[in-house]
Image: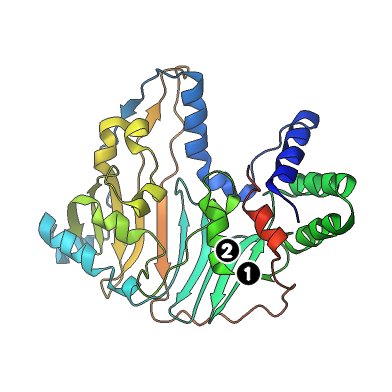
Amino acid sequence: MPTPDHLRTAMNEMARSTEPLPPAVVLQAAHRVRRHRRMLGAAVTAAAVVLVTTGVALLTPDRNRNEHPPAATGDAQQMLQNSLAGLADGDYTFSRTGADMVADIRRAAVHLPDSVLIEHTDTYMVLRTGPDFYMRYLIYGSPELNEQFRTYFQQHVSGAEGQAFTKVFAQLDGRKWVRADERKVTAAAADESLSHLEMMATLPTTTQPDATGAVALVGAVTSAQRSGDVITGTLDGTRKDPALEQLISDPTYLYGVGARTLPFRATLDDQGRLTEFVVTMPEQRMASQPAGPVEPEAPLTIRISDYGRTGVQAPPAQVDGEVSPDGYELLANDND
């Protein structure tokens, strides 16, 4: 069975013998955090200069403006809270981009308690349907790095251990569905920075049915105004909430006082349910950056649809066996 020493030795030798490769495709959603931390390393005492945006332009038809004059903050905040009821029912579809500590979700289909499907990319998916759990996962994150590790193990590990590695790489190639133990996958992701699994979304449950993050964002709202089916305002990104911290990481360091007044725009459907929530990130510049234009941060964007109409997800038509103990060992260390 492959041990942490096998993995550590392989990684150390490969680090000495190969050029660094770009991070895994699925981890690009966390590019902001990684970039800021690299900048911090280059200038330990640098302070962020915060350019707080003045608000979000509200574009709604004149008809809506006439029918629904701006509502008081209390009314708008209550409408926001009410808009989450559809998520509590656990039957919806959504996408999410721009979260700091979780990879982008191109599509997720939630139908509790029967099934949950989350697609990050073609090679990163998880599915819970009934009592069973499946995953499509590209071990080591990128095809290039995957191939380098596979080749290394073929050359340096023989016998039963070599065969075990070969099986794991065949299963976790990002193209095949494999059956897995959800508890073991969760445990493998628990070691911070050791596994790419920590960047994958947490699946919802009947007791915590929101997988979008909208509940945490709405809970952080400090001011709100409504015009028609659009609610705008500000939220406090520094609020102590584990779900919020997954979406907006290190906000005080990145945005200074602006972290407490992040502008948002929420859109509701004709039944008052949340269909979109967008958080605009302030521009910021580290002291070590040269003068000139600052690349704007991508907004945090959640889009929700198909309330009450998201079907139960069927098991994969083809499953390539079950993840072995060796596979869980690699999963727990594929970002060591």
Q: Position of residue 20 (x, y in %)?
A: 71, 33
Image quarter hosting the C terminus: top right
Q: Is residue 76 above or below residue 140?
A: below
Residue type, mark 1 in image? Ala
Element type where label 2 sits in the image: helix
Badge number at residue 184: 2
132 or 72: nearer the eye? 132
Mark 1, secondary structure of its residue: loop
Q: Position of residue 154 (x, y in %)?
A: 87, 49
Quote the CA–CA distance across marks 1 and 2: 8 Å
Where 176 falls versus 151 (above or below)?
A: below
Instruction: Tell me if 3 is positioned left or right of 200 in this view.
Output: right
**Res. 63 visible in picture:** no
Q: Residue at coordinates 63% horizontally, 67% vertically from top-left?
A: 135
From the image, tell me which residue sits under label 1: 180
Q: Amino acid at mark 2?
A: Lys
Residue in the image at 40% along x and 42% along y:
249
Colour mode? rainbow
Whether the residues at callouts 1 and 2 have beta carbons within 8 Å, the answer is yes
The reply, left or right, for residue 107 in relation to residue 309 is: right
